[in-house]
Amino acid sequence: MHMIFCDTNGVILRWRIPIGTTINAQYYKKVLQDKLRPAIRKKRPGLLESGILFHHNNAPVHTARAVTDVLAGYKWELLEHPRYSPDLAPYDFQLFPKMKEHLHGQRFETEEDIIQATKVAIKNLDKCSYVTAFKDWSQQIEKCVNNDECYIE
């Protein structure tokens, strides 16, 4: 399993979660502090100072006090996720479908082969794919909010 954090310019961090790791609030908080924040500083100089608009779904790990406290401490603006919606992430719009196109029909011998192939698929995505994904995602979020936070296909 991986955690992937991106913006309209592309992937900021792809973090491989060790096999057998339990993803709880403490683990997620540690990734935000020790992996994501330094990756933002390195890949998007100045972004931490100009302000971050952050989104993740409303899974208990994401809404735990330990996580919300660290995000508040960073002064990152947290976008709300509609309450009654299934997975509604930017990756579902453009990014995963484009990655699937790249991986379609391939067979993999090992987990490492899959990881390498997905790295290549992610690198092959152009900036336009990320911009479009976030645009489509924001339109879908708006539809949900305007429909009393009910998911709309």
Image: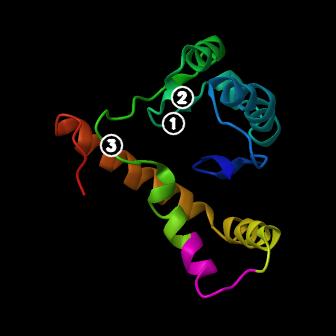
Residue 2: x and y in percent read 69, 51
Residue at disc 2, secondary structure: helix
* Mark pair 3, 1: CA separation: 12 Å
48 vs 138, left or right, is right
* Mark pair 3, 2: CA separation: 18 Å
| Between discs 3 and 1, the one toward the N terminus | 1
17 vs 72, left or right, is right
Q: Residue tagged by mark 1?
A: 56
Q: Name the residue at 58% across, 22% down.
A: 76
Residue closest to the eye, 110 or 72:
110
Query: Which of the 4 image quarters holds residue 83?
Result: top left
Q: Amino acid at mark 1?
A: His
Residue closest to the eye, 67 or 122:
67
Q: What segment is highlighted magenta in the picture?
A: 99-108
Q: Amino acid at mark 3?
A: Ile
Q: Name the residue at 44% across, 59% down.
A: 93
Q: Residue tagged by mark 3?
A: 141
Q: Amino acid at mark 2?
A: His
Quadrant into which the C terminus falls: bottom left
Residue at disc 1, secondary structure: loop
* Mark pair 2, 1: CA separation: 7 Å
Residue closest to the eye, 47 or 85:
85
